[in-house]
Image (cartoon, helix red, strand yellow):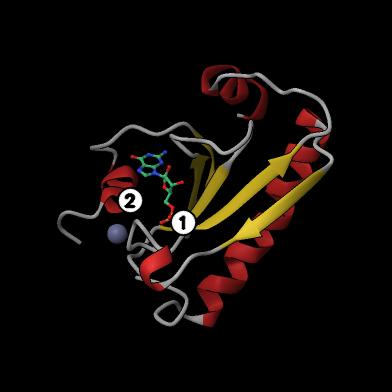
Amino acid sequence: MDNCIFCKIIDGSIPSKTIYEDEVVKVFLDINPLAAGHTLIIPKKHFKDFDDIDLETLNHIMKVAKDIKLRIEERLNPSGIRLLQNNGVLQDVKHFHLHLIPTYNKDMDLNVDKVFEILK
Ligand code: 5GP
Ligand code: ZN
């Protein structure tokens, strides 16, 4: 899709801090994290939102989400992780993405570069 930021991340014309990818998905750090380790999982094929995406792709995204959640827990030791997917006016980037947003009991003042070194 022309003018889709996340399609440009997939084709490499916009750089991303990618911590996992396969033939279906790309997983990278959010550029403006709500907490250390805030991660996005996106399908490589452009789907707009939860209505648009097919169940097979969604199932694969959830399988990857389980693995990435464990990786974040093992390496950053959060006290919890939220899975979030926005639609309609809540969705800023109109290419399906699942957020993984950790939360911490203690102060986690890590910048994105340090988090990338830990999670990649
Ligand atoms: P939404 O509100 O659509 O659910 O969330 C979009 C998310 O994408 C936001 O958390 C925002 O920080 C992130 N984002 C927007 N543009 C970029 C980008 O170019 N690179 C990365 N890594 N994240 C982005
Ligand atoms: Zn797209």
- Extreme-left residue of the structure: 2
Regarding mark 2 in the picture, which secondary structure is present there?
helix
Q: Taking 27 as reference, is 96 left or right? A: left
Name the disc covering residue 6, or none. 2
Ligand 2 closer than 8 Å to label 2 CB: yes
CB contact under 8 Å: marks 2 and 1: yes
Against 9, is 88 above or below? below
Q: How many marks?
A: 2
| Quadrant assignment for the C terminus | top right
Against 43, is 75 above or below? above
Quick one: label 2, few (<14), some, or many (20+) residues within 10 Å? Answer: many
Q: Who comes first in sequence, dot 2 or dot 1?
A: 2
Regarding mark 1 in the picture, which secondary structure is present there?
strand
Name the disc covering residue 42, or none. 1
Against 28, is 109 above or below? above
Q: Taking 110 as reference, is 80 left or right? A: right
Ligand 2 closer than 8 Å to label 1 CB: yes
Distance of mark 2 from mark 1, alpha carbons? 8 Å
Q: In the rendering, at what x and y percent does residue 78 appear? A: 80, 36
Q: Taking 104 as reference, is 29 left or right? A: left
Q: In the rendering, at what x and y percent does residue 43 appear? A: 44, 61
The residue lying at 65 percent from left, 58 percent from top is 83
The residue lying at 51 percent from left, 72 percent from top is 57
The residue lying at 64 percent from left, 46 percent from top is 101
Foreground residue among 93 and 6:
93
Residue 65 appears in the rendering = yes
Name the disc covering residue 60, or none. none
Type of the residue with mark 1: Ile
Q: In the rendering, at what x and y percent does residue 19 appear? A: 56, 36
Type of the residue with mark 2: Phe
Ligand 2 sits in quadrant = bottom left
